[in-house]
């Protein structure tokens, strides 16, 4: 692969990594809020003992779980891109 092509791929990978890391920071903030909300809703459901409050608690817990899964997918994608970046750097060093 040409040096120019490697540089272009490295730039694209680096840009994507930077974007994902920024998104991950936002997701982690949201996850903190959703976790607190799920805890609050669970307590309210125990105290109120109504169908509505139980539904709200399950919904809040579901939102928290979905965001947790999303966070894990993002972390996996970041790890893959970091691996790809390392491979491209190794290839670039070998081509020099």
Image (cartoon, rainbow, N blue to C red):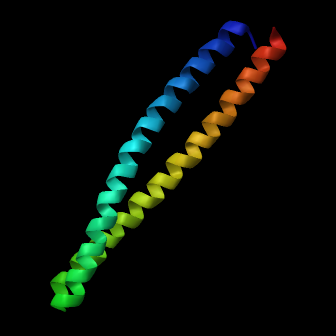
User: As displayed, is residue 44 above or below residue 84?
Assistant: below
Quarter where residue 60 is shown? bottom left
Residue 33 appears at what percent x and percent y?
29, 59
Count of picture labels: 0
Q: List the single residue furthest toward the bottom.
A: 49
Residue at 62 percent across and 42 percent down: it is 79
25 left or right of 10 in image: left
Q: Is residue 50 visible?
A: no
Residue at 38 percent across and 49 percent down: it is 27
User: As displayed, is residue 93 above or below residue 15?
Assistant: above
User: As displayed, is residue 82 above or below residue 37?
Assistant: above
Quarter where residue 22 is shown? top left
Q: Considering the image in quadrants, where does the N terminus appear? A: top right
Residue at 55 percent across and 22 percent down: it is 12
Residue 25 appears at what percent x and percent y?
40, 43
Residue 80 appears at what percent x and percent y?
64, 40
Q: List the single residue furthest toward the right.
A: 94
């Amino acid at each position: 692969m040409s040096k120019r092509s490697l540089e272009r791929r490295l730039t694209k990978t680096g840009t994507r990594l930077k974007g994902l890391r920024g998104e991950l920071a936002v997701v982690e903030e949201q996850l903190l809020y959703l976790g607190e909300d799920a805890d609050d809703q669970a307590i309210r459901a125990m105290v109120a003992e109504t169908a509505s409050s139980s539904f709200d608690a399950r919904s809040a817990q579901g939102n928290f779980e979905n965001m947790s899964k999303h966070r894990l997918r993002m972390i996996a994608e970041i790890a893959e891109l970091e691996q790809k970046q390392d491979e491209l750097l190794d290839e670039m060093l070998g081509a020099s």
